[in-house]
Amino acid sequence: MSISAPKGRKIMALDIGSKTIGIALSDRTHTIASPHSTIARGKWQKDLESLKSVIRAEEVGMILLGLPLNMDGTEGPSCQAVRQFARNLQKDSELTDFPIDFWDERLSTSAVERAMIAQDLSRSKRDAKIDAAAAAYILEGFLNRLRNQHSNP
């Protein structure tokens, strides 16, 4: 599988939940993944405007959506919701031709939560940061794959 990312522009990863959207960003060289923010979900137009604001301000060139596959690799209702989210993004005139890709996010939130517990973060601090941290975990997997692809063509 060959993957690509826009040169000189950031990648925005999203961890989409029913109540929140975790956002992480890469740097322009696609080396580092950093948690950015969490959006409390509301009406679609509000969510869209919040995302577009980050896209413009951070000069994002690609969106990576975490795909919550079942443990056996099949897609369930949560995956269908993420794919619909992507279709809705591409209906917007500013994002019609915007590159959108998916990345397996199985166990991302669990891995991040275990790391936060190991750091002895309180539940309230974990809750405030977990969605953006999960998005960064997803993005890090994608960036690692990009690096491996470039070093082993």
Image (cartoon, rainbow, N blue to C red):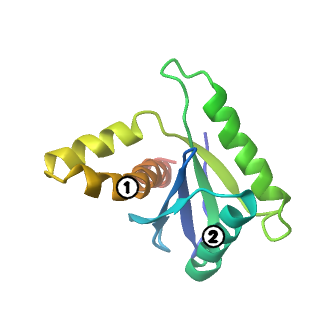
The amino acid type, in three-letter code, at marker 2 is Ser
Q: Is residue 119 left or right of residue 24?
A: left
Please provide percent x and percent y for residue 131.
Answer: 43, 52
Which callout, 2 or 1, points at the residue further toward the start of the chain? 2
Few, some or many C-alpha atoms within 10 Å of disc 1 (few <14, some 14-19, many ≥20)?
A: many
Which quadrant holds the N terminus? Answer: top right
Residue matched to label 2: 50
Tally of marks: 2
Q: Can residue 6 be seen in this view?
A: no
Residue in the picture at 29% in, 43% down: 113
Q: Which residue is drawn at 73% across and 57% down?
A: 44
Distance from Cα at disc 2 to Cα at disc 1: 18 Å
Q: Residue furthest top?
A: 72
Residue depicted at x 85% and y 58%: 91
Percent across and percent down for residue 121 are 18, 54
User: Which disc is residue 116 wearing?
Assistant: none
Could you tell me the amino acid type at mark 1? Ala
The secondary structure type at the circle numbered 1 is helix
Q: Where is residue 95 in the image (x, y as percent from the top left)?
A: 78, 65
- Relative height, residue 54 to residue 30 (above, below): below
Q: Name the residue under label 1.
A: 133
Res 62 → quadrant: bottom right
**Mark 2 and mark 1 residues within 8 Å of each other at the beta carbon:** no
